[in-house]
Amino acid sequence: MLQKYARFVVNNAAQVNSIENGLRMLTYILPGRFADSELASEAIYTLLSFVGVYHDGLLTRAAKTGLLADKDGKPIEIEVSPFNRYQTRLSKQSDVYRITALMLSGLQFGEKLIEMAIVKKYGEKMRWKVVCWIEVAKVVLRLNLLQLSGRRMVTGSVIPERLVDPAQLGPVKPTAKAAATAYGETEGIDGKAGSGMMQADGVWKGERSGLKFRAVRDILSQTEESANLGTYVSTEARHPETVSPALSLVRQYTALGVAGELLFILRPILYVIGIRRLGKNDWRPWALSLLVELASRQMIRTDLHAASDRESPRRTVEKDELSRRKWLFVYYLLRSPFFDRFTESRMTRIADWCSNKPLLNLVGALIHDYLPLWQQYYFYTSAS
């Protein structure tokens, strides 16, 4: 049954992607439309998150086996990002890491839905107990990832990102062996996982990675008399991050960096404990969380800056994660008591102003619909 479903997804990737995007857009406009609409919206979004990860895996496997082609009929070329190389390497290195990453991602996908369901079924008291349990579970999982990665930065997403854009795909013209591999019916070509194959144009294609390499004698035989191997290498040179070992894409922390990462991992649970003891409208949990996050950021930046001086410039994965963490500070504007005291009234005025303007009235309606969600539900603004 799963093989039939996988075949359907690969053969109709563009249409399936359009349905996913349509449903995802629906989740943004459902809140406030009817009773329990936010619960229905979050349920759809959570389901799409799980299904999307599964579909991405199917398309990636199909692309690596040469099953997918663009609209011009040319095989899809996969450019693996440094982030994907890093996460894939860690997952292949340790089954425990892979399972832990999937468990953490599952919690992140479903935490809002769980909180909503608990509030509606059992009320506020049970909600904060469940929120605390979820945050404790995420802390344990992230600490495990920190240890398994060799004391490296724990990124916001811990599973590989989408490699294939379904909107760019054309008709699928599978060969028997490529289709069997893509749909999970065999481990690889001729039953050998990780083997490669030499194509008709003299290019060797890796079975697992999908990367293509030309034989040296083929390069020399096809270059002009004035050309040489050095010229070819210089023209085909890759960025250092694309050829360096995957684990070197994120450097190991020193003691200072580990302390900063621990603060970042523990920050959400400290915030929740503060809310449970002092109340949501007390300034102390809000201020403590902000101070802990600022200290964490400074310690990690100092550690990575020192490593850059010793070794090489900061890596792309590190820069992207630090940039993501910087934007998380925006959520402090949406958390009580700051939100109740300053943000809510200003956003309400903006929404009222937009409501009377063509095209902007949709923005105003969305702000009005989401203001109660930001105020009522913890995980909408937790950034954990």
Image (tube, rainbow, N blue to C red):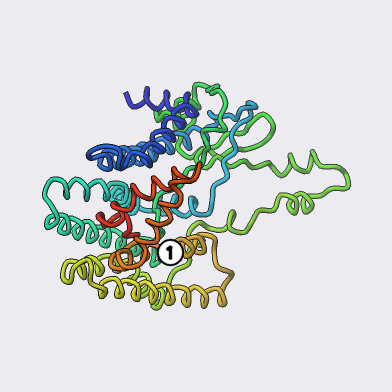
Please give left or right for residue 172 compared with residue 283 in the image.
right
Q: Is residue 160 above or below residue 177?
A: below
Kindly identify the residue that appears in the image at 43 percent across and 46 percent down. 355
Q: Secondary structure at mark 1?
A: helix
Residue 328 drawn at (x, y percent): 41, 62
In the rendered image, which quarter contains the C terminus? bottom left
- Residue position for label 1: 325
Instruction: Quarter of the image for the N terminus: give it.
Output: top left
Residue drawn at 21 percent across, 67 percent down: 275
- Residue at 32% x, 47% y: name it: 109
16 left or right, relative to 312: left
Residue 332 lies in what quarter of the image?
bottom left
Q: x%, y% of residue 159?
A: 40, 49
Where does the image place residue 101, in percent across and percent down from the top left? 34, 52
Q: Is residue 141 above or below residue 215?
A: below
- State which quadrant residue 311 falls in: bottom right
Q: Position of residue 31 (x, y in %)?
A: 31, 42
Compare residues 19 and 197 and report the one nearer the observer.
19
339 relative to 91, above or below: below
- Specify few, some or many for label 1: CA neighbours under 10 Å numbering under 14, 14-19, or 20 or more: some
| Image-quadrant location for residue 381 | bottom left
Residue 245 visible in image: yes
Q: Is residue 162 left or right of residue 199?
A: left
Decide which of 266, 18 is in the foreground and name it: 18
- 315 on left or right of 262: right
Residue 95 visible in the picture: no
